[in-house]
Amino acid sequence: MLERDIFAGFGGQGVLLMGQLLAQAGLYEDKQVAWLPSYGPEMRGGTANCSVTISDKAVASPIIDNPTSLVVMNRPSLDKFEKAVIPGGKIFVNSSIIDRKVEREDVDVYYVDCSAIALKLGNPKVANIVMLGAYIEATKCVEPETVIKALQHKLGEKKAHLIPLNREALEAGAACVK
């Protein structure tokens, strides 16, 4: 198993968190992982992306030039990274704010209305978790329950009350690709 993925969007959309949760879940499942963040001088509103590798074998480098999957939360990220995805790879598009379709025909594309789904759940801040649920369902690289465990670790006891909402968001995202 080898997933080499890029998560990208504006700062504040939770793309780095998606990558962190995925990497932590991989560690919990005894997989080899690498997480490499990249963001502009301003986190909120600037561009942000991270590379995540999850593998059964040792990861030689955290740098990803040709991802197996791409998760994009905004149009500039789609424009920048679409061509880099390997043929046969996957592209996950936040169709709530991205106003164009993927131009390639040699990849699997998943359009996820993240913002609308998050609003239905009562909190627009879980749009990234909705997208992460879609990604996990399509790739099967980690178990959803392991992501919840990683989220519990990240949120701590002070924010443990947010776990049920995030669980719903993961499930709603997964339902988009079933």
Image (cartoon, rainbow, N blue to C red):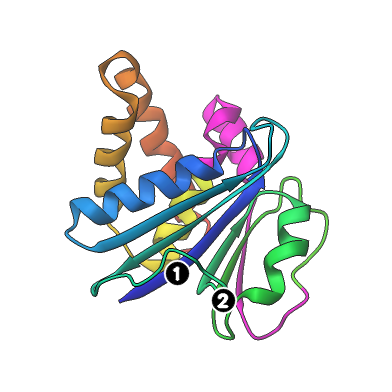
Residue positioned most to the left: 30
Q: Which mark is residue 4?
A: 1
Magenta-span inclusion, residue 106:
yes
Q: Residue 146 carries which label?
A: none
Mark 2 secondary-structure assignment:
loop
Snapshot quadrant of residue 104: bottom right
Observer-nearest of 55 and 63: 63
Q: Are marks 2 and 1 in contact (CB under 8 Å)?
A: yes
Which stretch is magenta?
Answer: 103-129
**Residue 146 image offset from top left, x and y in percent:** 25, 48
**Residue 46 image offset from top left, x and y in percent:** 72, 38
Mark 1 secondary-structure assignment:
strand
**Residue 127 image offset from top left, x and y in percent:** 57, 39
Snapshot quadrant of residue 21: top left
Observer-nearest of 144 and 21: 21
> Residue type at mark 1?
Arg
Instruction: Give the spatial CA distance, label 2 vs label 1.
Output: 8 Å
Q: Counting other residues with Cα less than 10 Å from the Cα at mark 1, is it few (<14), some (14-19), or many (20 or more)?
A: many
Magenta-span inclusion, residue 113:
yes
Residue positioned most to the right: 99
> Residue type at mark 2?
Asn
The residue at 52%/30% (across/down) is 121
State which quarter of the image contains the N terminus.
bottom left
49 lies left or right of 30: right
The residue at 33%/28% (across/down) is 163
The residue at 55%/72% (across/down) is 90
Snapshot quadrant of residue 59: bottom left
Residue linked to disc 2: 66
Q: Where 63 falls versus 22 (above or below)?
A: below
Q: Counting other residues with Cα less than 10 Å from the Cα at mark 2, is it few (<14), some (14-19), or many (20 or more)?
A: some
